Amino acid sequence: MASAQRPILCQKVTTMLQGNSFSIGDRLPGERRLAEMFNTSRNTIREVLCNLETMGYLEIREKSGCYLKSKDGRMSWEMLRKRKSLAANRQLIETLMFVAPRLAKAEASRLSPKDIKKLEAATAKLGEAIINFDLPTVSREYIAFFLTLAKVSGNDYLILLMKELAVASQNLTHAGTGLSEVQIDSLFAYHVELFNALRTASRNRPTSLPSAAWKRSTSSSCRKTSQSRPP
């Protein structure tokens, strides 16, 4: 029973900490008092407090008690997946801007015909989404393109990063908000250029990837998105 209570109690205690009753640095009531407040045992509340310390909310000081360390806790993928704001969308684009150019350049010569077909399919879906101005799909297919490159690299961290970005993009309320049709068209023109360069490189012909164009288009997108307001 106690183990089943813990996730619910964690949420209840977290809600209490995020309210107006506590400020950063405040000492929490003792275990006995918390157990009474939440109608549970001291052992269970102790486990909950330890969990909240691991999550970054609390600091447990020996022979002193528990103190509120943060109302937000430690950032995790689970928390990022739930974000829906324009700021979250901007940060997602910035993450792609930092990672994608180097990833494309590193894996260009290692792409197989099968990989090229996957990239071509993602590019086609991206184009269709742009024609329909389906901005959430634009985000999803754009990340799918770079997820394929990450899988070619065999780097588990990159693969997980791209998968998490894909999940996060699906939850964004304002995915793509603030990008004009001109900017979307410019981004797609770059994307086609990048795909053609990757296809050429995969055939072992020397080519240069359009990294400068990528930086210009994504930087412009980030600036525009950060200045937008929800509809």
Image: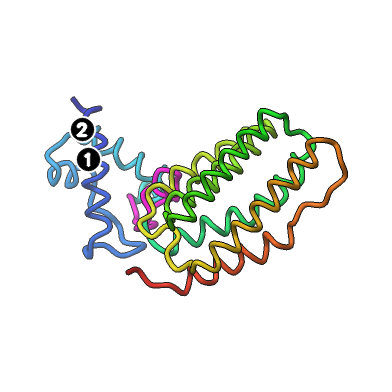
Q: Are marks 2 and 1 in contact (CB under 8 Å)?
A: yes
Q: Is residue 71 magenta?
A: yes
**Amino acid type, mark 2:** Gln
Q: Position of residue 165 (x, y in %)?
A: 50, 46
In this picture, which residue range is highlighted in magenta?
66-83
The residue shown at (21%, 36%) is: 42
Residue with the most extreme right position: 206
Measure the alpha-carbon separation of dots 2 and 1.
6 Å
The quadrant in which residue 160 appears is top right
**Residue placed at 88% from the left, 45% from the top?**
206
Figure check: 172 above or below 145: below
Camera-side residue of 138 and 131: 131
Return the x and y of residue 90 as percentages of the image width and height.
50, 62
Query: Image point 21% across, 28% down: which residue?
Result: 2
Residue under label 1, please give it.
9
- Residue that protrudes farthest toward the top in the picture: 1
Q: Amino acid at mark 1?
A: Leu
**In front here: 90 or 46?**
90
Is 34 covered by the magenta stretch? no
Which quadrant: the C terminus? bottom left
Give the secondary structure at mark 1. Answer: helix
Question: Dividing the picture into quarters, in which one does residue 222 lie?
Answer: bottom right
Residue at disc 2, secondary structure? helix
Rendering quarter of residue 52: top left
Residue 93 in percent (x, y) is at 54, 57
Q: Is residue 172 left or right of residue 96?
A: left
- Nearest to the observer: residue 66 or residue 88: 88
User: Which residue was labeled with disc 2?
Assistant: 5
> For this rendering, which residue is in front, 172 or 126?
126
